[in-house]
Amino acid sequence: MQVALVGATGNAGSRILAELVRRGHSVTAIVRDVARVPSAPGVTAKSGDVTDERGLLALLEGHDAAISAVHFVSCEPEKLVETVRASGVPRYLVVGGAGSLELAIGTIPLGLRLIDAPAFPDAWKQEAAAGCAFLDLLRSETELDWTFLSPSAMFVPGKRTSKFRLGGDQLLTNEYGSSISLEDYAVALVNELETPSHSRKRFTVGY
């Protein structure tokens, strides 16, 4: 596929870029500093910014899909979604946050989002709240074929194992807590790109 990846040099974006390259996709890596984009087969680095609507629109046009891997606090959700819609890309995948996921005991929902839990770190709340708002905006979207993939609570560098679980709106946990490596997250996202299973939905990935 021809894929536009916005934020291709961030923690998640760089892993997604590597996964796309591994599977032979052609990628337009849209970043502010093109010098940070690694040279790889099928990768074209383009200078762009999510706040530049006209410039981003031109960069997205003609692709089979767009992937957004940018911090929510660094963009204006309505303008970004409007730009993606106007570009005509058939699919839009978003690197989401865990804050909007629902907490549960087993299969019993607690009626509480992760961001609302007393122990949720204050340092993450602004970004998490912006992610919740972004998801709400997508859920009201009727034209874009979007997918929002939330990671588990701990979203850190690790190994690419390709062994993980998928869920819906509830936080995935096991006896060790709630986690997913950036590398396995990238596997799950590109799996969704290649074999769509969550059109106009949010889903999550974890161990």
Image (cartoon, rainbow, N blue to C red):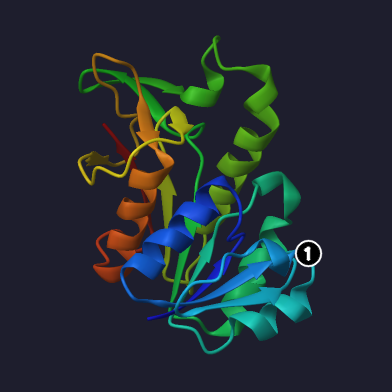
In the image, residue 131 sits, relative to residue 93, either above or below, namely above
The picture quadrant where one finds residue 126 is top right
Camera-side residue of 178 and 88: 178
Nearest the eye: 58 or 15: 15
Dot 1 corresponds to which residue?
51
Q: Quadrant of the C terminus?
A: top left
Image coordinates for residue 87, horizontal then vertical, percent: 59, 83
Q: Is residue 139 visible?
A: no
Q: Position of residue 78 (x, y in %)?
A: 68, 61
Identify which residue is drawn at 56% across, 17% down.
120
Residue occupying the far top of the picture: 118
The percent position of residue 96, horizontal first and vertical second, equals 50, 46
Screen quadrant of the N terminus: bottom left
Visible residue check, residue 77 = yes
Is 113 displayed left or right of 203 in the figure?
Answer: right
User: Is residue 112 or residue 192 the one in the foreground?
Assistant: 192
Image point (47%, 62%), residue name? 17
Q: Give residue 150's position: percent from left, percent from top.
A: 43, 42
Q: Amino acid at mark 1?
A: Thr
Residue found at the very far front of the displayed protein:
39
Q: Quadrant of residue 34?
A: bottom right
Task: Report the residue at 61% width, 17% height from top.
Answer: 121
In the figure, residue 102 lies in which quadrant?
Answer: top left
Kindly state the secondary structure of the residue where label 1 is placed: loop
Q: Is residue 185 above or below residue 190?
A: above
Residue visible at 38% across and 60% down in the picture: 19
Residue 104 in the image: above or below residue 20: above
The answer to whether 57 appears left or right of 170 in the picture is: right
Seen in the image, is 204 located left or right of residue 166? right
